[in-house]
Amino acid sequence: MKAIDLRSDTVTKPTPAMRRAMMEAEVGDDVYGEDPTVNRLERRAAEIAGKEAALFVPTGTMGNTIAVKLLTEHGQEVICDSRAHLLDYELSMVAWFSGCVVRAIPTADGILSWDEVRRQIRAVNPYSAPTGLVAIENTHNMHGGTVYPIQTIREICDGAHERGLKVHMDGARIFNAAAATGLPVSEIAAAADTVMFCLSKALGAPAGSMLAGPAALMAKGRLYRKRLGGGMRQVGVLAAAGLVALEETPALLAQDHANARFLAEGLARIPGIAIDPGKVATNIVVFDVAATNLAPVEISARLKQSGVLLNPINERQMRAVTHYDVARAACQQALEALAEAVTR
Ligand SMILES: *Cc1c(COP(=O)(O)O)cnc(C)c1O
């Protein structure tokens, strides 16, 4: 039996159309800038993001790392929320590569406000690390796929720019934000200096992310990409899948969101599980299992025996992520397995 894999949307396998495009991809040496498929992907991604240029990078982590490097100077502070991916899951690349420290702001749902950001900006003085950058995560991963209201993005970006600061959007799942709000990706990212998004998650490509922004910055970003080991050669075989992902998958994301809501509503009915289904706007469902008196790792182990893969994220919470390889019927099965696992 095929496992129902709700661990992440990174587990999506390339579709038949992607595999065909990969096989037929026209390629060249991308370090020389000669891979026509990569060049096409970068132009298309820039267009979708509403930016001058884009850079194909192997991972989202590398995209965020390059963006932070481009937008800061050594010794500056980067403001983000306290559960940001670039703080908790990127091996402190903000410090390691860019020489910056993070100023983390705790939030209820991962969404920063300009007022919270404004109060953390350090004035120039002989003691503080000067603030250089604000990083916002949209959708927010660990807070359950929450979406920034467009007005909040504009307030943060306008406020930051007035103070001479830059803004990077970690839009790993910006297409989910677009599906949830009905706004084009270009509008969501418009006010930010740079935006990163992943092709490898719910969009379904086997690998790759895009960093988009001003052409001069992306040209400089190519050098950082090479330094980080991301100078790939005939990588059009991957870019081809990315191009298909950009055209094929965004229209399917609403179904993932409906499935996530369905999961959340079912979870809310299981004794000992706490979640507010009204807050599930995209494809990530974070729920609290503390009242089951079972450790999340134990629940995870029991689920695995029934063919459901679902990860703990800490001592009390677990995370389910929907994607096109998990249909509604599989979500129903996962709910039944969970109900059984926590009452057994
Ligand atoms: C997955 C993710 C990334 C990084 O992506 P990788 O390709 O795994 O390096 C960055 N930010 C967020 C919010 C993510 O969910």
Image: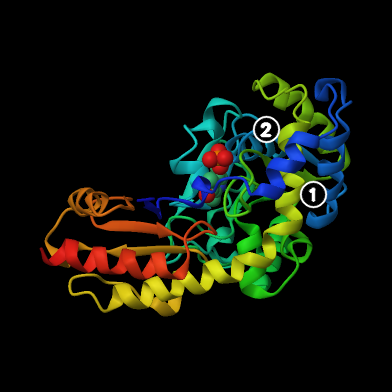
Q: Nearer the viewer, mark 2 or mark 1?
A: 1
The residue that disc 2 covers is: 73
- Tell me which amino acid carries mark 1: Ala
312 in relation to 269, above or below: above
Q: Specify the quarter for ligand 1.
A: top right
Q: CA distance from mark 2 to mark 1?
A: 27 Å
In the picture provided, is 205 more to the left or to the right than 291?
A: right
Residue 33 image point, x, y percent: 87, 26
Q: Secondary structure at mark 1?
A: helix
Q: Secondary structure at mark 2?
A: loop
Q: Which of the pair 264/67 is nearer the observer?
A: 264
The residue that disc 1 covers is: 45
**Which residue is found at the position 84% from the left and 36% from the top?**
37
Residue 255 in view (yes/no) = yes
**Which residue is found at the position 78% from the left and 55% from the top?**
49
Query: Crowding at label 1, few (<14), some or many (≥20) Cα neighbours within 10 Å?
Result: many
Query: Crowding at label 2, few (<14), some or many (≥20) Cα neighbours within 10 Å?
Result: some
